[in-house]
Image: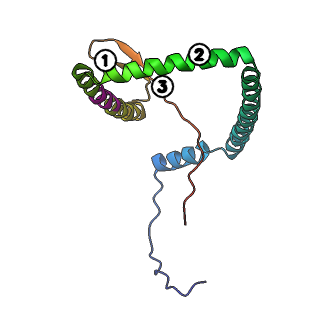
Amino acid sequence: MSDSKLEPIQEAEIINDPSQSSANTQSAQAFDIHAYNATLEIVRRRISILDKAKVELKKLNEMLDDIFVNDADYNKADEAVKEVAKKKKDIQAQLSKQPAAVQANGKIKDLKAQIKENTESLSLELMEYYRTSGVTEIEDADGNVQEFKIVVKLKPKKKSDF
């Protein structure tokens, strides 16, 4: 026992509310530890399979790159491509300095930022719509039905510096 004082016990009447007891029974039955453990093992196995496949893919990509790097004709063609790309980049840089190009580029950046912001907002709003309705389809203002999907991605947890 701890040194802290306990609250005095108060007498209370127990009321058996059938709607609450069935809800509590359903929520207790909703969590199945066996299904949870089975799902957890399946997820862990899938992560392992994906990790092994990524390692193998990296090895194969390196092997393929080595085939190209070790070929004289490929290296010669690659150098020619790099020269042409440099010329193109120089011309593009000069054209980008023209007032019309500068103005158009500014408008493009603003519009892209606006699209990104609205897309993020729409994503959050669709998540809320799905949470409240349970439906993955929505009708737009013109009466067209559009479907959306919810994507979950697995990523490593950031380590905290404590």
- SS at mark 3 in the image: loop
Please report the residue visible at 51 percent of the width from the left and 85 percent of the height from the top.
Answer: 4
| Magenta stretch bounds | 108-116
What kind of residue is marked 3?
Answer: Lys
Position of residue 47 relative to residue 101, above or below, is below
**Mark 3 touches mark 1? (CB < 8 Å):** no
- SS at mark 2 in the image: helix
Position of residue 46 relative to residue 80, above or below, is below
In x, y percent, where is residue 40? 69, 42
* Magenta run includes residue 110: yes
Circle number at residue 80: 2
Q: Earlier in the sequence, mark 3 or mark 2?
A: 2
Please report the residue visible at 72 percent of the width from the left and 26 percent of the height from the top.
Answer: 61
In whole angstroms, how far apart are the C-alphas of marks 3 and 2? Answer: 45 Å
Circle number at residue 149: 3
In x, y percent, where is residue 102? 26, 25
Q: Which of marks 1 and 2 is nearer the N terminus?
A: 2
Please report the residue visible at 52 percent of the width from the left and 45 percent of the height from the top.
Answer: 22
In whole angstroms, how far apart are the C-alphas of marks 3 and 1? Answer: 16 Å
